Amino acid sequence: MNIDTIKAVYFVGAGGIGMSALIRYFLSKGKLVAGYDKTPSDLTEQLNKEGAVIHYEDNVDLIPEVCKSPADTLVVYTPAVPESHTELSYFRTHGFEVMKRARVLGEITNCSRGLCIAGTHGKTTTSSMTAHLLKQSHIDCNAFLGGILKNYNSNLMLSEKSDLTVIEADEFDRSFHWLTPYMAVITAADPDHLDIYGTADAYRESFEKFTSLIRPDGCLIMKKGINIVPQLKKGVKLYTYSATDGGDFHAENIRIGNGEIFFDFIGPDIHISDIQLGVPVKVNIENGIAAIALAWLNGVTADEIKKGMASFAGPLRRFDFHLKKDNIVLIDDYAHHPAELKASILSVKELYAGKKVTGIFQPHLYTRTRDFADDFAASLSLLDELILLDIYPAREEPIPGITSQIIFDKVTIPSKKLIRKEGLLDLVASEADTFEVVLMVGAGNIDRLVEPVKKILDK
């Protein structure tokens, strides 16, 4: 199918953050865009306002007639949708071109110079930083991001003049194997998605396969110490980076205080002093080093880098400050892997040293809870106080014996509570005057509770 000549695009699982960028792309190309998602959200409502036609019942009769012509319609689906889905089955049995989201993204970006950021964690912030640094410079870029970047209120950027495309490269279901990177970053390779990969070795090997896809004229920028062996084509350059552990690109002279972070960027033949982090949390130093390295290698100037890093507002739900007062702070973060949780909690504790940090955590997926219960408990034990919610299942069916209780029992701090999500607001209201710094974390629907919690705490 020729993506340029199709008339309609139908999305099965239209509300996913990665899918929404493709929806916006096809709307910008003048295509009729429709789709299905399980539940409405702020994002699907916004996409409807932008011109998409999205419904929330798995019903073939609700598919617009214009999307029922196999010759003119591309169907895009996310692996999170079960194979038994009625609409997806209809398209498969009626001769439609049905593609995974990752394959469509690979097709669209194949003719551009892809800057692909992969990793278990840090990839959304790093890719968003990279896109912002390029977009506000004389270089410019296109971008397909895994989060809504607050500077632009979108996860899609398009350029009339640049052939650089920043892509958040998703390892779930080996999606990033559809990409052909010009330059790539790997931020982390801690095991995850073991329901898909089975073993930590298979997960690691998937990243090694990803490195083999980099173009011969490109490069790989890999966090120092990652346990993967790159499989690079001849001609591909390899760089390492870190925040404080050295490498080709790293930070020096880090200063943290008064809610601000400054550092110097050091790289081959480059030293940029006094870079300020627009989102001042410690983990963003490391993300920033990778983003700056990509921007620098693609021609962004030192002055443009300094201005871009200072003005970076961050993606939604990545260290998103909702209250920032002397007596109460409320932060929302997407962390859903033990390593992400640890980095998030330690960053907040350093930023607000001496204050009590309360974490409200919603585990995401039964399999991830089962596979990493000990690690989740160790990370959550870094808090001063924990409120643990029930598991958000997403695409999964329950697993007997797997509940939030198996994490809760292993958490070592004395101040901990296990409650259902429905009871959170009453608990927060009853203890509101005891909170100092509240960190709400998880990849499920805990974000729906952030505004109600904010209203309670703001009083």
Image (cartoon, rainbow, N blue to C red):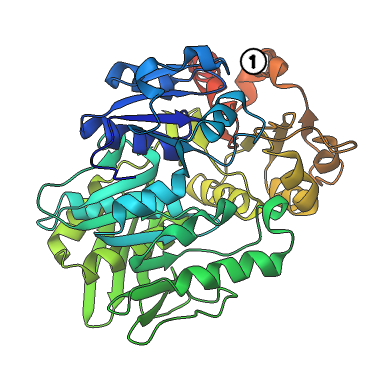
When asked about the image quadrant of residue 30, the answer is top left
When asked about the image quadrant of residue 266, the answer is bottom left
Q: Secondary structure at mark 1?
A: helix
Above or below, comparing residue 265 to residue 378 in the picture = below
The three-letter code of the residue at mark 1 reads Leu
Q: Position of residue 146 (x, y in %)?
A: 42, 43
Residue at x-position 18% and y-position 50%: 135
When asked about the image quadrant of residue 29, the answer is top left
Q: Is residue 140 left or right of residue 112?
A: left
Q: Position of residue 162 (x, y in %)?
A: 14, 55
Residue at x-position 34% and y-position 45%: 1
The residue wearing badge 1 is: 425
Residue at x-position 41% and y-position 24%: 43
Residue at x-position 76% and y-position 48%: 377
Q: Position of residue 167 (x, y in %)?
A: 35, 53
Q: Is residue 203 left or right of residue 457?
A: right
Q: Is residue 359 visible?
A: yes
